[in-house]
């Protein structure tokens, strides 16, 4: 009796529960549904929702030191137009030629102070293109912009070459004589 | 053009599902009652009394994602000029024309070696280096992401010290986690200490640093604000120092094409995003920037630096 009962208990769940689950698993792995029914799998995607917010971005007109401009889109709302006095175009690190021409300091430093003081005197004789360009960058950007590439742009090259040919003695004979005297 | 096949696909799906639709629909719709009511309303409207169908029930939220909001100069610069230049500069004929290696003649395996994993091929005390990325028109040196990271020392004592860094990073990057439905934007993440260090009173699990990973257009926008606003205005900035010549060429660090450098707290104040209201940030932090590129293996570091310097970031030899 007891044995038969036990058997009935042990066998009955296996027949009712375990077999169907195994069948379900098999059907899932082989074919979930007729392929014609679910051609698209869009039903598997999550429900559409409103995406998380983004910080607002504001356009900012950036005017570079040479007068050219571009629009930057940043999270900064305030200056709608930003004028850069120091940027890639006049920094000696990016434009080493500007330093050589004496443009490097811009409005700051000794050269800048000198330039400010003697702006109207027309002292731009010897380092002509340099002083011209400097003044242009400071005040009248339009003038230099018009003739972006002029003939006298290359003057610094030729003049510089000529100047370098002159020896130290020729350039400053007094100093050279002094030096020589000291050495001796 | 791309949407056309999708549409046809969807329509075909609809056609096929017309037959068992009555069975499928109630299970699909969120509220079976709403669908049934809409059906009723439609049938009614066709027959006699036009019951006002509420638009809210009919309306389903479409999939929303934020498209491109503006063109970024630096990505245009990369695509129009830099990519081709870099391909020309970094192209290696030797790599591209290398004949396929003949299969090495291997000695017969001893019974010991037979079913064991082979040991790595060693060069010195290191395993053989990773495969060098061959540069072709498909795999031009390219930025994958830019990571900005800062460690806030005060955060060990009080967590709220991180807040200013989080706010600053959010302003600089303009990113939120999955913002605008754009996948891949991580947003500002707070990073937790992995190990405890008793000397600094640091325990594992403490939030100590903040990072953002920028990808795509946001990455190029960050480079723009870094190069056009920050770097030229730094005082006595000599450029980013190159690693000394003594750096080992086969070290794992120089085989992954990651260029990294750091900036002082003053650099952060030059970002236009921060500059517009500096007072909002109780403290400015220095930060590290990591440029992750797709380059690996031999010369990866040099090529990565060539790519980064293409974005007008100057390097100098110490």
Image (cartoon, helix red, strand yellow):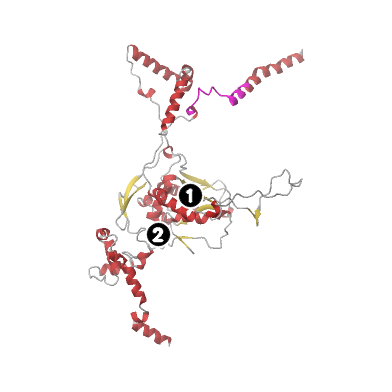
Above or below, B263 relative to B188 = below
Residue found 46% across the figure and 29% down from its top: A47
Chain letter behind tag 1: B
Q: Residues within 10 Å of mark 2 (few under 14, many from 20)?
A: some
Considering the numbered disc 1 on the image, is that residue within a helix, a strand or a loop?
Answer: loop
Whether residue A126 appears in magenta in the rendering, the answer is no
Residue B103 pos. (x, y %): 65, 48
Rounded to the nearest angstrom, the CA distance separating label 1 from label 2 is: 32 Å
Q: Which residue is mark 1?
A: B140
Considering the numbered disc 2 on the image, is that residue within a helix, a strand or a loop?
Answer: loop
Most foreground residue, A51 or A169: A169
Q: Which residue is mark 2?
A: B234
Left or right: A151, with B111 as reference point = left
Q: In which quadrant of the rendered view does residue A171 lie?
A: bottom left
Most foreground residue, A152 or B99: B99
Q: Residues within 10 Å of mark 1 (few under 14, many from 20)?
A: many
Q: Furthest-left residue in view?
A: A120
Residue B260 can be seen, yes or no: no
Residue B306 pos. (x, y %): 47, 56
Most foreground residue, B60 or A39: A39
């Amino acid at each position: 009796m007891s044995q038969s009962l036990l058997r009935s208990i042990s066998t009955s769940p296996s027949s009712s529960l375990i077999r169907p689950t195994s069948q379900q698993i098999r059907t899932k792995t082989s074919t979930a549904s007729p392929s014609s029914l679910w051609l698209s799998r869009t039903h598997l995607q999550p429900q559409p929702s409103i995406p998380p917010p983004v910080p607002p971005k504001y356009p900012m007109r950036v005017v570079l030191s040479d007068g050219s401009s571009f629009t930057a889109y940043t999270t900064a709302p305030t200056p709608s137009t930003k004028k850069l006095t120091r940027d890639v175009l006049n920094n000696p690190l990016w434009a080493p030629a500007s330093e050589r021409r004496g443009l490097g300091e811009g409005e700051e430093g000794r050269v800048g102070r000198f330039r400010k003081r003697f702006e109207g005197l027309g002292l731009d004789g010897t380092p002509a293109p340099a002083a011209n360009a400097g003044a242009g960058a400071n005040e009248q950007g339009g003038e230099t912009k018009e003739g972006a590439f002029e003939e006298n742009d290359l003057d610094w090259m030729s003049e510089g070459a000529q100047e370098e040919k002159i020896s130290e003695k020729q350039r400053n004979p007094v100093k050279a004589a002094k030096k020589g005297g000291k050495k001796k | 053009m791309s949407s056309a096949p999708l549409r046809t696909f969807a329509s075909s799906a609809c056609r096929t599902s017309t037959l068992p639709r009555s069975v499928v629909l109630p299970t699909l719709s969120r509220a079976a009652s709403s669908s049934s009511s809409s059906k009723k309303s439609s049938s009614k409207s066709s027959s006699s009394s036009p019951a006002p169908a509420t638009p809210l029930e009919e309306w389903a939220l479409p999939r929303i994602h934020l498209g491109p909001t503006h063109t970024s100069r630096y990505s245009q610069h990369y695509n129009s000029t830099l990519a081709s230049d870099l391909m020309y500069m970094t192209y290696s004929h030797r790599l591209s024309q290398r004949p396929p290696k003949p299969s090495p003649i291997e000695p017969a395996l001893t019974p010991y070696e037979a079913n064991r994993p082979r040991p790595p091929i060693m060069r010195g005390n290191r395993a053989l280096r990773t495969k060098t990325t061959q540069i072709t028109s498909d795999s031009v040196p390219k930025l994958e992401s830019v990571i900005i990271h800062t460690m806030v020392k005060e955060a060990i004592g009080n967590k709220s010290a991180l807040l200013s860094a989080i706010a600053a990073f959010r302003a600089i990057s303009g990113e939120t986690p999955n913002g605008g439905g754009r996948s891949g934007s991580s947003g500002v993440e707070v990073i937790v200490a992995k190990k405890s260090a008793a000397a600094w009173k640091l325990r594992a699990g403490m939030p100590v640093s903040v990072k953002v990973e920028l990808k795509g257009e946001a990455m190029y926008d960050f480079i723009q604000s870094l190069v056009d606003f920050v770097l030229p205005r730094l005082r006595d900035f000599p450029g980013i120092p190159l690693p000394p010549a003594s750096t080992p060429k086969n070290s794992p660090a120089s085989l992954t094409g990651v260029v990294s450098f750091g900036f002082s707290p003053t650099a952060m104040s030059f970002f236009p995003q921060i500059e517009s209201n500096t007072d909002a940030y109780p403290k400015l932090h220095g930060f590290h920037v990591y440029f992750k590129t797709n380059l690996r293996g031999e010369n990866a570091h040099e090529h990565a630096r060539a790519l980064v310097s293409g974005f007008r970031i100057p390097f100098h030899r110490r």
